[in-house]
């Protein structure tokens, strides 16, 4: 599970990352709000841990952006602000839980695991069925109305990423790394070419119940109609 950490204190960040790694999670730290948002778009994590006060903004501002992208991801606040008013504010703005510093490892780990269970984060099923489309992940085939559609490997990888994350905005950088790997040096315009091919090959259009929406200067979102 990918965890995004927003923490500007180096010692605190090192401590939390160590605890997350002990739980078996893959944690990436950002030390500013802008860096966190850039990394969030790039990696699309499954869990977020936010500090409140940052050099360029607040965790609440970041939380507001997260909720516009993904309303389901668990978000845990860790902060020195521990008044009842602050806690209520964070929870009312969309945080799932709240821990006051100084953190204690056992409590932190228990809260993270509880939020993970609550969100029912698990490996995607080997078969994905959405409307007229069926994706066989084991065989790496995609069917429309029961007919297998011939795709190149990269077109399949891009399509799978879109279908697994349908309804979510995916950046070009995220799609590029998902299909070509984290060390890819290809231009993100490569993604545009493959998304266009996927749209055409799979017949992703209103008649078949889906559209791939282009998000200006960001990426794409696969949307199910009605």
Image: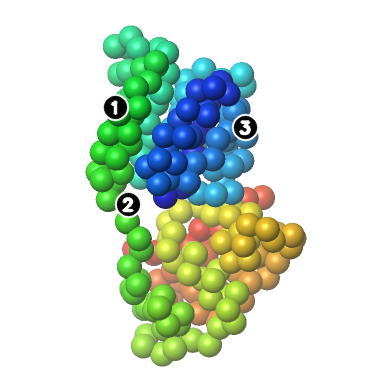
What colouring style does the render use? Answer: rainbow
Give the label, 1 or 2, closer to the camera.
1
Q: Nearer the viewer, residue 81 or 188?
A: 81
Which residue has dot 3 on it?
Answer: 34
Q: Secondary structure at mark 1?
A: helix
List x then y, in percent, for residue 196. 62, 72
Decide: is 101 above or below 192: above
Q: Nearer the viewer, residue 35 or 129?
A: 35
List x then y, in percent, for residue 77. 39, 26
Decide: is 127 above or below 174: below
Q: CA distance from mark 3 to mark 2?
A: 27 Å
Q: CA distance from mark 1 to mark 2?
A: 20 Å
Q: Quadrant of residue 63?
A: top left
Count the marks. Answer: 3
Which residue has dot 2 on it?
Answer: 121
Lower position in the chain sequence, tag 3 or tag 2? 3
- Is residue 189 visible to the viewer in this orientation of the structure? no
């Amino acid at each position: 599970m990918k965890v995004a950490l927003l923490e500007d204190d180096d010692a605190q960040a090192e401590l939390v990352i160590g605890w997350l790694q002990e739980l078996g999670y893959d944690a990436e730290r950002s030390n500013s709000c802008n860096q966190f948002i850039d990394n969030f778009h790039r990696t699309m994590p499954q869990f977020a841990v936010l500090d409140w006060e940052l050099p360029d903004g607040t965790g609440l501002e970041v939380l507001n952006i997260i909720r516009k992208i993904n309303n389901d991801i668990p978000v845990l606040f860790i902060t020195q602000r521990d008044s009842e008013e602050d806690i209520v504010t964070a929870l009312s703005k969309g945080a799932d839980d709240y821990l006051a510093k100084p953190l204690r490892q056992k409590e932190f780990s228990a809260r993270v695991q509880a939020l993970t269970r609550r969100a029912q984060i698990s490996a995607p099923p080997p078969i994905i069925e959405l409307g007229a489309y069926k994706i066989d992940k084991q065989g790496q085939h995609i069917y429309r109305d029961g007919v297998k559609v011939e795709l190149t490997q990269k077109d399949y990888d891009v399509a799978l990423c879109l279908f697994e994350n349908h309804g979510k905005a995916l950046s070009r950088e995220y799609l590029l790394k998902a299909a070509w790997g984290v060390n890819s040096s290809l231009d993100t315009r490569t993604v545009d070419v493959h998304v266009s091919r996927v749209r055409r090959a799979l017949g992703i259009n209103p008649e078949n119940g889906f559209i791939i929406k282009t998000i200006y200067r960001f990426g794409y979102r696969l949307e199910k109609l009605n």
